[in-house]
Every structure is written in structure tokens, then in C-alpha cells.
Amino acid sequence: MGALVRKNEAQVPVVQKEEAQYLTFLLGNEMFAMDILGIKEIIEYGSLTTVPMMPEFIRGVINLRGAVVPVVDLSARFVRPATEVTRRTCIVIIEADNEGETQDIGVVVDAVSEVLEIAAANIEPAPSFGAKIRADFISGMGKVKDKFVIILDADKVLSVDELSMLEQAAGALPAAEAAALPVARQ
């Protein structure tokens, strides 16, 4: 499985993963992926409650088994046209790290494709320029069937300030109103 890699004998060995699993999904016609370990679940796109005074890429919030979860339109976040809701549109629930605390965030995607195993040898470092999104969102470029898949870093898709804004959005609803949100369909 993992291989031990030693730089110097004095250093502690580092375990390097040979391959990892990634959930692939479409935004427009482009394939993206996220490490499956950061994904909690995938749900059908359902009714959202909009929260006033939020950026356009924050679609609103959903009630996920009693928890208020903010929902981000990933296309709009990447300064693209907002996602058009179709039968294949999904919300991927991810766990993002916000200064040591995890926060559930729903991410709207055009369609979920599949879970792929990508060998570490087939992942190139993030480009320094030329991608349509900022390179700090990208953890690597996976080579799959002679094409590149943009592997996103779930913790960096949203900045710390934006994550704080999402917390405020979720907290902006009074408890009674949050409890009255329609429960997301699963």
C-alpha cells in the first residue's frame, strides 16, 4: 500500500500514499475532483432558503437532519455563470476546516460523475498560471484517460473569511426559523 520514503537517515520516515480516491463531478463541461475523505454525502438538489446580504455564490442554506448547512454554487464561486438546476444537479456535502474547526458546506455541482482512484504518480502539482481558477484552490492536476482532472482542495475552495461569512449565514436564522427549514432530500 504505502511506501516509506526517507530523505536522510536522521529524519523520520514519511508514509506516502500510492493512490487515493476522488469524487469527480462536472462544472459546465469541465471535470473536477475532491478527495473522497473530505466528502460526507451527496444529496439531491432541493429547496434552499436564501439568506439576505450574502455574495451571489452563496445560494442559501438547507436543513440537513436538523443542522443548518450553507450551500455554495461552485461555478459562481469560480466566477463563472451560476449553475442551472437540472435533474442531474446535486449538492455535495463537504467538511471544510475553518481554523481548526470543521464545518459542513453544501457545494452545488452540475452532475456527479464517479469515484476514481488516481495514483500519486498521475497527479501533477497545481499550475502557477493558465487555469481558469486561482491555483491556490487546486491541490493537483490528475491525469485520467489522457485528460486532466482538476483536483480541488476542499479546505481552500473557500477562504477563511468566506467560511466565517458562511457561519454567519447559518447563524443568521433564528433557531425557530432554522428548524422550520424544509429538510433536504437524500
Image (tube, rainbow, N blue to C red):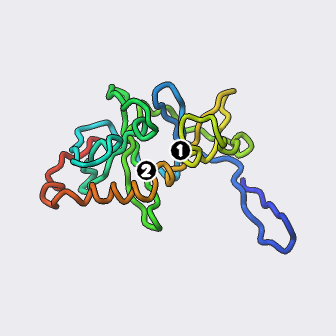
Q: Is residue 68 left or right of residue 79?
A: left
In this rendered view, identify the residue nearer to me: 181 or 135. 135
In this rendered view, identify the residue nearer to me: 159 or 116. 159
Asked which quadrant contains residue 167, the reply is bottom left
**In which quadrant is the C terminus drawn?**
top left
Residue 179: x %, y % from top left: 16, 55
In this rendered view, identify the residue nearer to me: 183 or 103. 103
Residue 55: x %, y % from top left: 32, 45
Task: Tell me which amino acid carries mark 2.
Answer: Ile
Residue wearing tag 2: 94
Q: Residue at x 45, y 51 (%)?
A: 158
Above or below, 4 relative to 85: below
Residue 68: x %, y % from top left: 26, 55
In this rendered view, identify the residue nearer to me: 88 or 175. 175
Distance in Å between CA atoms under marks 2 and 1 = 9 Å
Q: Could you tell me if the residues under marks 2 and 1 are in contact, i.e. CB atoms within 8 Å?
A: yes
Mark nearer the N terminus (2 vs 1): 1
Q: Residue at x 87, y 71 (%)?
A: 9
Q: Is residue 125 left or right of residue 55?
A: right
Callout 2 crowding tier (Cα within 10 Å): few <14, some 14–19, many ≥20: many
Residue at the bottom extreme of this rendering: 10
Q: Which secondary structure, mark 1?
A: strand
Q: Is residue 144 left or right of residue 182?
A: right
Residue 80: x %, y % from top left: 43, 32
Q: Which mark is residue 58?
A: none
Q: Residue at x 44, y 36 (%)?
A: 79
Callout 1 crowding tier (Cα within 10 Å): few <14, some 14–19, many ≥20: many
Residue wearing tag 1: 34
Q: Residue at x 65, y 28 (%)?
A: 147
Task: Tell me which amino acid carries mark 1.
Answer: Met
